[in-house]
Amino acid sequence: QVQLVESGGGLVQPGWSLRLSCAGSAINISFFTMDWYRQAPGNQRELVATITDAGSTNYADSVKGRFIISRDNRKKTVYLQMNSLKPEDTAVYYCNALRVTVRRFDFWGQGTQVTVSS
């Protein structure tokens, strides 16, 4: 059974950094586009960062220049380096693995809480 497990969340002050990890099991993430989403209370889940199987990256405007997504296929892990954190970055962060061929493979982690507050 495919599992994605996020870790690295926590409570930090504005301006600090965190690195989130998403570790996969029973999945070869090298074939997947990997995404980080976030959802704040009362808000819809939003796409934060994407890294394709080829290594191309894309970011939401709100995090561009502050967040960096990367992947280590051998470790089956995707990372989200979050710098210069702001209170508006507070949310539950979710990892997603997506592959669309003749079928759609779409897997989610359980989420990790990030709270940015002084």
Image (tube, rainbow, N blue to C red):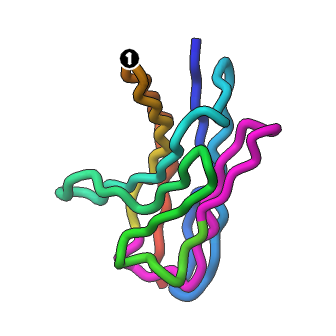
Question: Who is closer to the viewer here, 39 or 50?
Answer: 50
Say how many tags the image has: 1
Mark 1 is surrounded, within 10 Å at the Cα level, by few (under 14), some (14 to 19) or many (20 or more) other residues, namely few
Q: Residue at x 51, y 80 (%)?
A: 85
The answer to whether any part of residue 28 appears in the image is: yes
Q: Which residues are magenta?
A: 69-89
Please say whether residue 8 is visible from this viewpoint: no
Place residue 70 in its image quadrant. bottom right
Q: Is residue 115 left or right of residue 67?
A: left
Q: Kindly state the secondary structure of the residue where label 1 is placed.
A: loop
| In the depicted structure, whether residue 55 falls above or below residue 84 | above
Residue 42: % across, % down: 17, 57
Could you tell me which quadrant the N terminus lies in?
top right
Quadrant in the rendering for residue 17: bottom right
Q: Nearer the viewer, residue 12 or 30?
A: 30
Dot 1 amino acid type: Arg
* Residue 76, x across and y down, in percent: 72, 36
In the rendered view, tell whether residue 79 sits above or below residue 15: above
Disc 1 target residue: 103
63 in magenta? no
**Residue 74 drawn at (x, y percent):** 82, 38
